[in-house]
């Protein structure tokens, strides 16, 4: 679980949807250890365009698969379960219809993230690009 320490902190997230409108995204994200230290708790809230968004994520280690596992509960009532694999400073979330690549830089103080979606389970289309900067 020590590798998850890179995420711990308060982050400001800015970016845009990769649709024709290029809708702006601004959120505040907090990653902290849940009581007992077995799970990382991530809370997020903000706006995509004119819409309020947010959610709660729990990340832990799945001994059966050998991967981290993420359960994200969003403000629209959707639950997304993803595997989370680390390769150096690059982490990849893989869900049933979503994939995100997170690249840490600047001594783990910046995250560059590409979110992608698929309708057929094979062909992914970029959906948003965001940058998170650690502020605390």
Image (cartoon, grey):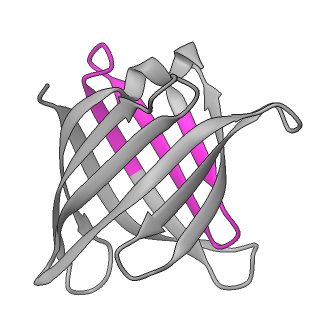
In terms of image quadrants, where is residue 62?
top right
In this view, the residue in front, 39 or 29, is: 39
Above or below for 136 versus 25? above
Q: Is residue 98 magenta?
A: yes
Single out the residue that lies furthest toward the front: 35
Residue 79: percent from left, percent from top: 55, 71
For residue 124, side relative to residue 64 (left or right): left
Q: Camera-side residue: 97 or 128?
A: 97
Q: Residue at x 35, y 63 (%)?
A: 55
Q: Is residue 61 left or right of residue 112?
A: right
Most extreme residue toward the right is 64
Compared to 102, does 77 lie above or below?
A: below
Q: So how many labels did they put on this image?
A: 0
The spot of residue 21 in percent (x, y) is 20, 86
The span picked out in magenta is: 91-113
Please tell me in which quadrant of the rendered image residue 11 appears. top left
Our reading of the magenta stretch's main secondary structure is: strand
Q: Residue visible at 32% across and 82% down?
A: 19
Which residue is at 47% across, 34% downward? Answer: 40
Identified at 26% across, 86% down, the residue is 20
Q: Is residue 5 magenta?
A: no
Image quadrant in which the C terminus is located = top left
Relative to 72, say whether 24 is above or below.
Answer: below
| Quarter of the rendering occupied by the N terminus | top right
Q: Does residue 6 appear to the left or right of 46 in the view shown?
A: right
Task: List x then y, in percent, for residue 46.
Answer: 16, 64
């Amino acid at each position: 679980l020590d590798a998850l320490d890179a995420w711990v902190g308060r982050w400001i997230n800015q970016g845009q949807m990769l649709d024709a409108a290029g809708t702006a995204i601004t959120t505040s994200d907090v990653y902290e250890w849940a009581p007992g230290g077995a799970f990382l708790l991530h809370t997020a809230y903000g706006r995509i365009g004119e819409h309020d968004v947010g959610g709660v994520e729990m990340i832990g280690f799945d001994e059966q698969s050998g991967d981290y596992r993420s359960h994200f509960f969003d403000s629209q009532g959707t639950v997304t379960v993803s595997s989370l694999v680390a390769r150096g400073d690059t982490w990849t979330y893989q869900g049933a219809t979503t994939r995100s690549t997170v690249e840490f830089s600047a001594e783990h103080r910046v995250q560059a993230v590409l979110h992608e979606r698929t309708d057929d389970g094979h062909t992914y289309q970029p959906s948003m690009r965001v940058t998170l900067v650690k502020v605390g």
